[in-house]
Image: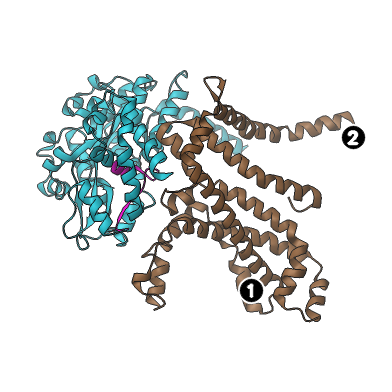
Amino acid sequence: MNLSQRHLGLILIAPGLMLVAALFLYPLCFSLISAFSKDGAFTLEWFAKAFELYSTDIVFTVVIVLASCALTGLAAIVIAGTLTLGENRYIVGTLKAIYRWPLFIPFIVAAQCMRTFLAKNGLMNNTFVSMGLMEPLQAMSFLDWRGIIATFVWKQTPFVALLLAGALASIDRATLEAGRNLGASRPRVLFELALPQVMPTLMVALVLSFVTMLSVLSVPMMVSGSQPTMLTVDMAFRINAYGDYATANALGVITYLISAGAAILYLKRGLSEGAPR
Amino acid sequence: MRILTIACSLAALMAASPLAAQTLNVASAGDQNMVDYVKDYLGPMFEKAHPGVKVVSVGTGAGDSGSQKILEKLDAQKSAGASDFDVVVIHQKAAGQMVKDGLLDKYTANVATAKLATGEATRNALGTDVSGYVIPMFQSQTALAYNADMVKSPPSTFAELADWAKKNPKQFGYNGIKGGMSGVSFVAGWVYAFGGDADKLMKGPYDAATKANWDKAFADLKEFNKVATITPGNAGTLDMLNRGEIAIGPVWVDMFYSWQADGKLPPNMKLKLVSPGMPGQPMYYAVAGKSAQKKLAEEFIALATSPQVQADGIVKKFNWYPGIDAANLEGKLDKAAWDKLFTDVTPADLAKNGKVFPIAPYFNDILEGYEKKVSN
């Protein structure tokens, strides 16, 4: 590559770089500085405050997001597995037609739907009651941590399933058919032959879901009451109620650290195995 | 060539239009109904009276966060030539801060209707002197809404409510402090009731040591929360009341009446303002200090606070209590509309148990105390 081409390359990526710098690096530095300083001097005061007030919420957030990831993974495996190995073409066709729908629904709309669907006297329980599956007195509200997890799983499953189904479709079918010919059941083929080959894709999809779910404000705000709640709600509250950016930024840094754990996994997978990025 | 002509004339049109018409930008903090109030009701009325003026209504979001956004925008434009907003509709907490920061115009002397509003709220916004800078748009009040079929004799004090909740677990619901102001108001009322000197919290002076007296109140509230339902937001409380999932919950009176009028709440729901009282708050009309249209802004506010508009728009259409003194509305409003507003919560109740929010530093202490001792 000669010099002018190199310059040309730099010029071509400059807008992108500038966007990253202006919209990500600058705010990142700004929030880091704000989280660690008071009147220009270094301090950990804001972190102390964040832990004092929100330690429960930090644990709650991590647990919610991890649980949602695990359930999303399971649901996606079932869907992608059915799409790849299913033999009833009506089931496969129907599933194929509808499983992507939640992808096109924004989190806030999903949250609004779940809010009336999962309530104690909401659509779901009322349906069960009218079908005679449940007594009205047994009805309970799911508008708490379970509601958040349900919304996250519902919203993220198609994304993970989409990537996973793509990966499953591209592996060599001969191995799967060999397994079937030798008498292995379909679940066994899925878990012992197919899945190990697409593990990197599954991991990457789950890591991306993890980071997405960590950053959603509308779902915990709308679906569940505020005690305990997720860090995004606490950050919004710090700013809206107190105008306190320092503690909000400290909470932000804690969120960065949590997602950095996931990002390391992602980069490792991405770089070493050449999985889709 | 034709495209070029069209493009040129379009560009010329766009460049010329600001000269031809004046634009008055009205920024409202608050729910969508407040934006609609300006957009669909006040704006057209003002445009009719002022040909060539266009009123643009923008919303900055519900609750204190909406006011915070206006504050930040005005603050960022402090050194600029003119601000984007002319008239701002803001909450008390932000109003005090904006007056302190010099972001607002001292305008009420130029508006005749300012004399019609004489309440405490025209001078004092959570401990900050705001006289001259604001005229209340409306007063709003929180109260307990209850389902009269499920609760035959509703509790009339906070202490009775705590007992009632113990006997009827999960039947009382409120939205904590992060889901909107009706929950915040309930918590403030709780501290007024059990935290000692409520008057000092509302009037000051601020003493940082006071919050130590609230430990017992917060410990009790933590216990109380175990038998209460935490609902998702102001509307969440109303939703759950509507579906019969809770029997009592704190709500904004105006939201309650609007929902009932829309058929979103059963007719057997009633309101009760328990003693020693729950807070309410006004929204304020103010003029941005850097507004380029101060005169127009003042005329807009004069219209908005005129008795007829307050009667038709604020009381009748939106079920808010008027921002100007109620006596000025006499004759402008039919009796039915007036009575409807005061069916459950009488003017006497309102005078006795309608409180203000604590002054800003105590307010923050209460919220943070709740986060520290109740929710974590």
Q: Residue at x 47, y 58 (%)?
A: A147
- A236 drawn magenta: no
The x, y position of residue B300, in whole percent, is 28, 30
Q: How many marks?
A: 2
Q: Residue at x 69, y 59 (%)?
A: A163
| Chain A palette colour | brown
Question: Could you tell whether B311 is left or right of A102 in the image?
Answer: left
Above or below — where is A222 with respect to A100?
Answer: above
The x, y position of residue B90, in whole percent, is 33, 32
The x, y position of residue B174, in whole percent, is 33, 50
Dot 2: element? loop
Q: Report the Cα–Cα distance between label 1 and label 2.
A: 50 Å
Above or below — where is B294 with respect to B53?
Answer: above
Question: Which region shows up in magenta?
Answer: B170-187
The x, y position of residue A76, in whole percent, is 63, 64
The chain ID associated with circle 2 is: A
* Residue for badge 1: A93
| Residue B318 visible, this orientation | no
Location of residue B150 (image quadrant): bottom left
Looking at this rendering, what residue extends furthest in the right direction? A2
Location of residue B270 (image quadrant): bottom left
Identity, as a three-letter code, of the amino acid under mark 2: Met
| Residue A68 visible, this orientation | yes
* Residue for badge 2: A1
